[in-house]
Image (tube, rainbow, N blue to C red):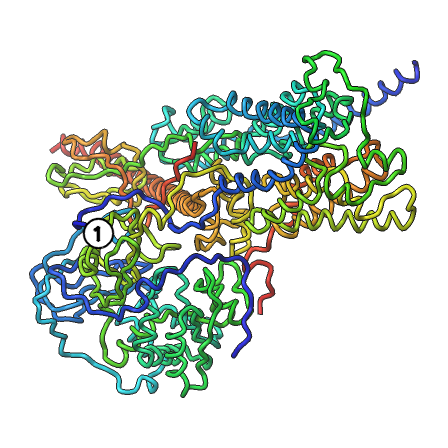
Amino acid sequence: MKLKEHRLKLQAAPLLKQSMTTGQTMRDVLLALLPATLAGLWYFGLGALLVLIASIAGAMLTEWLFSPAESRMQRLSDNTALLTGLLLGLTLPPALPLWMAFIGGAASIGLGKLIWGGMGQNLFNPALVGRAFLLATFPIAMTTWSPQSGPTEFFQIYASNLAAPFMQSVYDGISAATPLGLMKFEQQSTGLWALVSGNTSGCIGETSGLLLLLGGLYLLLRRDLDWRIPAGILGTVALFSTTLYIVDSTHYPGPLFSVFSGGLLLGAIFMATDPVTSPLTPRGTWIFAVGIGVLVVLIRAYGGFPEGVMYAILLMNAATPLIDRYTQPRVFGKGIKNP
Amino acid sequence: MIKLFKIRGGVHPQDRKQLSANQAIENLPLPPLLHIPLQQHIGAPAEPLVRRGETVLKGALLARSQGAISAPVHAPTSGRIMGIGGFPAHHPSGLSVRTITLQPDGNDAWVDHLDPVADPFTLQPDDIARRVAEAGIVGMGGATFPAAVKLNLRNRYALHTLVINGAECEPYLTCDDRLMREQPDEVLDGVLILARGLGVERILFAIENNKPEAFAAMNSAAHAYSQVEVVGLPTRYPMGSEKHLVQTLTGRETPARGLTADIGIVVQNVATALAVHEALRHARPLISRVMTVSGGAIRQPRNIHVPLGTPLSSLIDFCGGFKQKPARLISGGPMMGQPVPSIRVPVVKGSNGLLALTEEEVRLRSEMPCIRCASCVHACPCGLLPLDMAAQIRVGSLDASVNLGLLDCIACGSCAYACPSHIPLVHYFNYAKGELAARQRAQHKQNETKRLIIIRKARMEALKQAKHEMMMKRKRELATAKQRNTETPSTEVGA
Amino acid sequence: MIYAIFVIAALGAVMGTLLGIAAKYLAVAGNPLAGEIEALLPGSQCGQCGYPGCAPAAAAMAKGEAPVTLCPPGGRGLVAALAEKLGVNVDLCDVEEKQPLVAFVHEHLCVGCTKCFKRCPTDAILGGPKQIHAIFPDACTGCEKCFEVCPTECIEMRPMQATLQTWYWPEPARAA
């Protein structure tokens, strides 16, 4: 090439970049959620798929509606709305009326993200804000669990899925308690294999412990995940529930049941690890994770609900700015003893 | 082998040194014109001593240092002074700076009054510092702080160790590597002279482990000297940052915003040591340096021995030109280097590399919002929160960013390298530091203005007073004269 | 009922007394704000703000009649200081920084009339009668007083040149 004068844009160093991008991280998380999502569809059938689609549609439509016209496509293509909608959908009961799932998706993005100033500015996990919104608004629908449909009846959707907006929803009459519900209200434990494989009733994406762990492992290998958060949460839950189990084994479940039941794995691996709403430093992350673990066991053991992962994470989200403030790293050369 | 200590943070960029690491240092043929800026160092610019049309010999003093922190400039070859005036500076702003233009005559004839020292180790530290200052030597790792000023730190601090920085942790750069491989004895001699100049007993020569040949060469050269220890460092950016290098070697932290001299240590660069050797043993001032010309857009990456003042375009020509359009031209390394405004600008004392990087190498991507992933927090070697600092600067709260530690940032670029959202964090910090300095200057000017106004008012008052008194005096004189007049008329009339 | 009325009345009486005492003993004489603001201003009495001098400008600002951004020679630094003193929020990014100007004498036009240097509030002009005048850019505040009086129009207000020492990186462009 002939040598000539080059006028180049003024850009400050460094001019090298590592290869990971924020968009790539989002795609990795979506990929990691895929096995558990497929398992949910396998167990709960077409109804579950419709719920997921409704919640994703609600999320993405809201994002599109409230973005500046010129950056709409860019905002949708960063996959954050898709991810939020999917995460919310996975925490919903499979027989939820679709219009509620849609409103939940809209609330996730609207109340969970946009009113805070958009991506990266929110204090609480958007998907969990959406879920909390639904739980407060439609408490019965959100706590009515359907039995698994099984692969033969894949195309049979739950009647309540199609309930018209603001009408009394129709339930099939058959409802099944979740393992945590059974434990809390009837002191009846569920077998470990059922919990690990996901062969229980519950939210769409929370039942299969094994596949959730698989997704977590993938994120760990891709370095998209701060391993301290799931490790801290699961460790704390195991330790704390063991203590309670030793004290009173009829009312409190053992550590394995505690870890694999309910939304704990989904929450610990995919919700609490949301970088926007978790602390920055390793020290802060440990405090955050242990806090969630303690709150989960406390809510499950002494609270009114059988499950407490959502509120535990939201509460610790609220504490994140405070934790960040008190766990700032020491600045180089400050506070050292002068020789 | 001494025990090494861990530093926090840091990143592992691909070092890409293999592009030029095996190219022996070559001499650049003299270009048709040399542009020698009068400011190639931190501090006051040098003051020219030559005039247009004058002929000078190689090594002649062209401009003398001015003030306590400054450095003289010498002629890189023999030739005629074509002029002294503004020329684009080797600086991202592209502003012009006073520059001496020299047309080489091709003889490359040295000045005849060279005064080498047979045995520099018989000199007093003050004499060594004086000779280093006269040779115009500055820190050649890129900081360009006058080396003699650093030697004189011995007067104010209790020094015990000299650390030689051969880490060369910036990707692409291989000039220090080549110097250590090709001239280990000369480098070591310079190091020993520096130690003598500082009056220290212990010398740690630190080399990153990705340069085994340089380590072997320096190790065998230093074998005979028990006070010198050659240390292999783990490969990690920014190992070559002065304070982090010292922490790795000694486990001690330099106080924030202090000098390594506060804990008794002075750090010098490999190329600086070689320049000191040349200055003391051969009485040659600093008029040339070794540079790495590399990057994916350069046809034949090389390590070149370049006279100062050579236009960068001559270097690119010598390396076979570009093989594709470069996306970025950088002076120095890719992590901390500065963009080059034009390839007309000359080589200066602090230039250790010229990189022409392609689009693929720089991975230009559009900026995304921060998702607080904390990559920058984990990468920061200074324990700062780059994301919070940048967020404060973005909304204009510079004071808040200072409270978060903006002024403790060493601008190493680890945070911006690690950021998956491609936020130009260092650019924010550069801007904020500059803006704060500008505000400080404005404040200073305002205070000066006030002082000047007060002085002027006082002077005006005094003038008025003096005028008033003068008038009163005149009036009195007039009055007395009148009185005399009124007394005298009778006689006059009578006369 | 009566009890409640009594408690409220007693509370009112006690607090009213306390307020009265506080008003008497913690009173601040006059408004010191104008003086404090005047101390911050450059004090060159240049009149570029539209007020006859720095003291009237400070008084107007203390009364809230003038904005904190009124002083062109003070620049952004002054705006920040004033905003802090008065407790107002100003987005400094929006403050249109008037390019700082300094006077420059075209030597071939100067007749050495001394009119300009008599008016310069900061003694930034050097020269004497029948001598060509020169300006110290470091001391010039850009007040334009000399510019107005020069009979030969030999003074030009030029923007201050950035140097390698004063140049710094511009603010990065914002992502959408």
Instruction: Quickly name the residue at label 1.
Output: B343
Is residue B270 positioned above or below A75 on the image?
Answer: below
| Residue A84 located left or right of residue B151 | right
| Residue A321 located left or right of residue B214 | right
| Residue B259 located left or right of residue A159 | left
Asked which secondary structure carries label 1, the reply is loop
Residue C59 in picture, x, y percent from top left: 47, 26
Q: Residue furthest front?
A: A152
Task: Place residue B452 in its image quadrant.
Answer: top left
Task: Judge by depth and name the residue closer to the eye, A24 or B59.
Answer: A24
Task: Judge by depth and name the residue closer to the eye, B179 or C48.
Answer: B179
Parent chain of label 1:
B
Is residue A233 positioned above or below C81 on the image?
Answer: below
| Residue B73 located left or right of residue B454 | left
Task: Place residue B241 in its image quadrant.
Answer: bottom left
Is residue B406 positioned above or below A66 on the image?
Answer: below
Task: Place residue A74 in its image quadrant.
Answer: top left
Residue B111 in picture, x, y percent from top left: 14, 75
Label 1 packing within 10 angstroms: few (<14), some (14-19), many (20+): many
Q: Quadrant of the C terminus of chain B?
A: top left
Look at 56% across and 40% down and name the residue there: A31
Is residue C149 positioned above or below A281 on the image?
Answer: above
Any part of residue B161 in sight: yes
Task: Judge by depth and name the residue closer to the eye, B92 or C56.
Answer: B92
In the rendered structure, which amino acid carries the disc numbered 1?
A: Ile
Residue C123 in picture, x, y percent from top left: 29, 42
Residue B174 in picture, x, y percent from top left: 33, 66
Any part of residue B145 in sight: no
Q: How many marks?
A: 1
